[in-house]
Amino acid sequence: MRLSLFLTALTVPSAALAETFQRPIPQPQTAEAELSYLVAAVLLLVALICVQWLVRRR
């Protein structure tokens, strides 16, 4: 009896019990996110300038 229940549970497709995929709704970009992106971009530019300065000195 337990074996037949176990085999039945294995054969039931789990996809039939799953919900349909709900596509996420994109959120608008906040001012804080824009500011952090600006800071990251400026820091990357400063790092690239520093590397160029170090390489040029050789």
Image: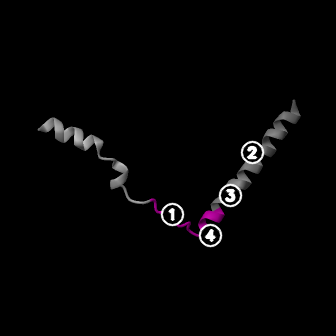
Per the rendered image, the range of residues in magenta is 21-35
Do residues under tags 3 and 4 come within 8 Å of each other at their CB atoms?
no
- Horizontal side, residue 52 vs residue 42: left or right: right
Q: Is residue 57 above or below residue 27?
A: above
Closest to the observer, 28 or 38 = 28
Give the quadrant of residue 37: bottom right
Characterize the local packing of mark 4: few (<14), some (14-19) or many (20 or more) Cα atoms within 10 angstroms: few
Element carrying mark 4: helix
Is most of the magenta stretch helix, strand or loop? loop
Q: Which residue is mark 1?
A: 24
The location of residue 50, given as percent across then percent down, is: 79, 42
On the image, the x and y values in percent for residue 51 come to 79, 39
SS at mark 2 in the image: helix
**Amino acid marked by disc 3:** Val
Residue topped by disc 4: 31
Q: Earlier in the sequence, mark 2 or mark 1?
A: 1
Circle 2 packing at 10 Å, graded few (<14), some (14-19), many (20+), is: few
> Any mark on residue 39, and which?
3
- Residue 47 bears which disc, if any? 2
Three-letter amino acid code of the residue under disc 1: Pro
Say whether disc 4 or disc 2 marks the residue closer to the N-terminus.
Answer: 4
Sequence order check, earlier mark of 3 and 1: 1
Labels 4 & 1 near each other (Cβ < 8 A): no
Cα distance in 3D space between marks 4 and 2: 24 Å
Q: CA distance from mark 3 to mark 2?
A: 12 Å
Give the side of residue 11 with respect to residue 33, left or right.
Answer: left
Q: Quadrant of residue 52?
A: top right
Disc 3 to disc 1: CB gap under 8 Å: no
